[in-house]
Amino acid sequence: MNKFLNQLGDALERAAKRDLERERPPRRVSRRLLVTVAVLAVVGSGIAIGATQLTSNESVAASMPAGALWLQGTDPTCTEVTPGVEYHCVLAKHPSDAISDWLGTVNETVDTTEHVNGGCRSLSHDGREWQCYIGQKAVDEKIVSQGFLGEKVLGPGVG
């Protein structure tokens, strides 16, 4: 999107330069064109920022306890495996003792807008190592259902 905005800006600069180089009075830029350019710039920036926030290691780590009450206070750290899709996460503290063997346990992840954005699967018996998937990949991995992905939740899941 940034490349598109740069190309658009360059094209506008060239057009303005041509208008200024001409002997006749410069053409007026239509209000519609200015509004369109402004909207594209704002929307493009929002998409780029949103994509970055959704797929950062920190946002995935924060989405784990937001999705499961028993992971609160565990201080997860995540590392990207597949950009924007798969993350390997390690908890600094053990999860609650609600489960004696965490291996294979799955939990949804919840983004800052309180929507299910993916899910994680425990890779260890003590529940400190997890593989997390964002979006459709979490459905493909059978962690969350297609109908649950994107649903608004009112707080972390319990059980």
Image (cartoon, helix red, strand yellow):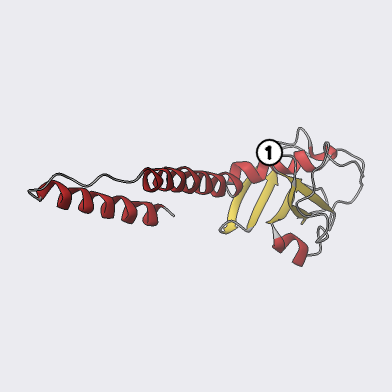
Query: Residue at coordinates 37% horizontally, 56% vertically from top-left?
Result: 3
Q: Relative to 144, is 61 above or below? A: above
In the rendered structure, the answer to whether residue 44 lies left or right of residue 151 reads left
Q: Measuring from the top left, give residue 92's x and y in whole percent.
A: 70, 38
Specify the farthest residue to the front. 24
Q: Measuring from the top left, give residue 82's x and y in whole percent.
A: 58, 61
Question: Splitting the image into 4 quarters, where does residue 106 fall?
Answer: bottom right
Return the residue at label 1. Answer: 112
Q: Relative to 72, is 5 above or below? A: below
Q: Measuring from the top left, give residue 148's x and y in whole percent.
A: 82, 54
Check the picture and name the quadrant holding the N terminus. bottom left
Query: Residue at coordinates 22% horizontally, 53% vertically from top-left?
Result: 15
Going by the numbered disc 1, the residue's amino acid type is: Thr
Query: Residue at coordinates 86% horizontally, 42% vertically from top-left?
Result: 157
Q: Measuring from the top left, give residue 74's x and y in whole percent.
A: 75, 36
Residue nearest the observer in this picture, 39 or 80: 39
| SS class, disc 1 | loop
